[in-house]
Image (cartoon, rainbow, N blue to C red):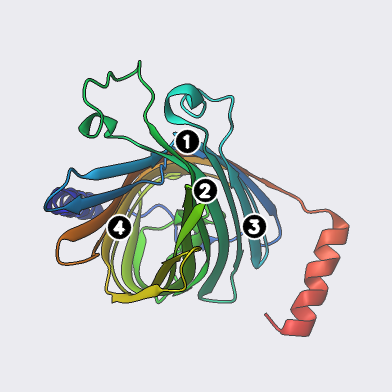
Amino acid sequence: MKKLFNILVYLTCLTFVFCQNVTEVDSTSIMSFTDKVFFKFHLDTEIDSYKATTDNNPDLHINTNNQYKFVISVDYDFFGASIGFSPKFIPGNNDNDLKGESSFSDYSFRFFPGKWIQKIQYKKTLGYYIENTHDFIPNWIENEDAYIQLSDFKTTYWGGATSYIFNPDFSLKNVIYNSEWQRKSSGSFIPSISYGYLRLSSTSGGVKSYENNFEVKLSPSYYYTLVVHKNWFTSLEISPAVALRFTKEGKSNSSTTNTYTRVPFSINGGLQIGYSSEKIIFGAKCNLESNYYNESHQTHITNDIIFTTVYLGIRLTPPKAVKKIFDKAHKKTGI
């Protein structure tokens, strides 16, 4: 956590040093493309991983056998949608003999009414393995012996997030969804509240164990986009967060359940470099995320994620039928 914080502080300072030396390139802060359909494809290295630390036993590192995830998204007017999956033909996603098989699917929808952004998401992952198998099996040989596999371990998530953009000259859609063009350097404080239901389950010896979590999280985030040259930009984001999580766990062969209330803390950050124009946008970004909470007096759970993303997007004229549907929606809703 300390190392991650130091990295984010360094990136923040570096970006604001640049800000003092860059001349603004255009008087128009944001170029919106609500009349265009925006298609984007991105590939990222995000891995769903967990780490449990106890006082009396070795740490437990749990990962999925999905090193790369592919996402297709489309945005038009005030609506957007994305589909994510892990292609099996990509090396790093198919080490099934050693790590077991993992599957991943991610569906999200988003709406952009004014300064608000509303997101709804469903995500499911099945099949994990214990990365530090050598701590549990003597004489285990990496790349030769199979890892301890948790093929029935599954995580399912339903949730959403609501964000508000305070600065009208800042485009969050340029940073997160890449569907707008930020033409003048700007930043904004963007508070967000997210809420979701996460279910973890596994089966062993015919007995199913489960953990149901409902969480509400508040994130006072800050974003800044620096226009380096006419079409080139770099963006920085930092978001500490605190949450309230209600947990219920049990087993299928018992009517006894345990309930907990936890207060997880997290810090997220990202750095992005991209190119944008009226027709296309492409770039790459690095995200860092660290989550922490106490499971008990002896156990501490952390979920650390560091991943990179490369993306390419193109803006096209929408079909007339699609435009008519959205025009009608505007008249009825007043959005």
Disc 1 element: loop
Query: For mark 2, what is the residue?
Result: 125
Q: CA distance from mark 4 to mark 2?
A: 22 Å
Residue 216 visible in the displayed image: no
Query: Residue at point 59% right, 70% down?
Result: 112
Q: Identify the amino acid type marked 1.
A: Asn
Check whether the beta carbons of the residues at disc 1 and disc 4 lie within 8 A of each other: no
Q: Identify the amino acid type marked 3.
A: Ala
Disc 2 element: strand
Q: Position of residue 169 (x, y in %)?
A: 43, 69
Query: For mark 1, what is the residue?
Result: 66
10 Å crowding of disc 3: few (<14), some (14-19), many (20+) = some
Check whether the beta carbons of the residues at disc 2 and disc 3 lie within 8 A of each other: no
Q: CA distance from mark 3 to mark 4?
A: 23 Å
Task: Point out the image quarter for the C terminus.
Answer: bottom right
Q: CA distance from mark 1 to mark 4?
A: 22 Å
Query: In the shown orientation, is residue 239 left or right of residue 92?
Result: left
10 Å crowding of disc 2: few (<14), some (14-19), many (20+) = many
Check whether the beta carbons of the residues at disc 4 and disc 2 lie within 8 A of each other: no
Residue 81 numbered mark, or none: 3
Nearer the camera: disc 1 or disc 4: 1
Q: Identify the amino acid type marked 4.
A: Asn
User: Closest to the observer: 116 or 227?
Assistant: 116
**Which of marks 1 and 3 precedes in the sequence?**
1
